[in-house]
Image: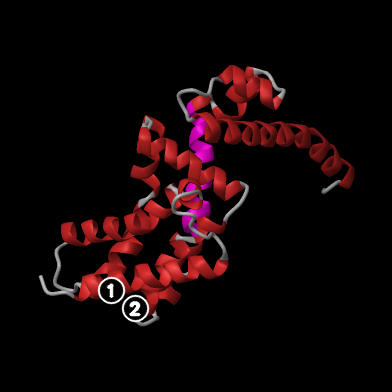
Amino acid sequence: MWNSNDSLKNQAMTRPSEITRDRILSAAERLFAERGYEATSIRAIVGKARVNQAAINYHFAGKDGLYREILSTAFRALTEHQLTRAQETKAMPREQALEEFVRHQLRPLLARDDLSRYIRLFNWETVRPSAVFRKLMTEEAVPFIGLAVDLMRRFMPKADQPTLMLASIWLIGQCNVFVRNREQLAGPPISLSLDDASVERLAGLISRWAIAGLAAPG
């Protein structure tokens, strides 16, 4: 028989563990974003989270497992919206679908807090990719890449899979160059505005340039 007192006892037992886990994630996310994977030590994470190393081993089986959890959360945060709207996007005219794709890829330009840290995490991986990151991309990036490939196929129905893959990487790269370099582009000499209107204009420009390129013969 269900007992409300037992339920309350279970909650009381699990809640401190969940708090510890969240504390570890929060501290590690900030340190990995500031320093990158290699320069962030378990000792630094333990100190910032105010836990012992045994807690990290218990919840994440070590530094790699902890980093994998954070990278996975970051990747989902940056791609989940597009994946959940995949069917809706497919129903749009291809030009509208491409602009929607580009607009969402540029969304981190307006981001603060978590998304900003996620971008810094991936910036570190661009400079020095870790084995954890490479494994994550192999296992979790397939649906998102497939979404981009399907979009490219609407513009190049006769292209083979390698060409579609290259086109997808190219399109994502047109957005990522702005996102990855957001802080530098916002300062002199470029002083790129990072408000809603400016990012919307940028999304329109990239979309039009991409559509013109995809429509060109050859």
Q: Position of residue 181 (x, y in %)?
A: 43, 47
Q: How many marks?
A: 2
Q: Specify the segment rendered in magenta.
A: 64-80
Q: Is 180 situated above or below 218?
A: above
Image location (x, y in percent) of residue 216: 16, 74
On the rendered structure, is 218 left or right of 51?
left
Q: Residue furthest left?
A: 218
Check if residue 175 falls in the magenta segment. no
Q: How is the image coloured?
A: secondary structure
Residue 171 is left or right of residue 215, and the answer is right
- Name the residue beneath numbered marker 1: 211
State the predominant SS element of the stretch in magenta.
Answer: helix
Decide which of tag 2 and tag 1 comes sooner along the chain: 2
Q: Residue furthest right?
A: 5
Determine which quarter of the picture holds residue 149.
bottom left
3D distance between C-alphas at marks 2 and 1: 7 Å
Q: The residue under label 2 is which amino acid type?
A: Glu
Task: Look at mark 2 in the image and give the residue it sits on.
Answer: 95
Left or right position of 85 against 173: right
* Label 1: few (<14), some (14–19) or many (≥20) C-alpha neighbours in 10 Å: some
Q: Residue at x 38, y 58 (%)?
A: 175
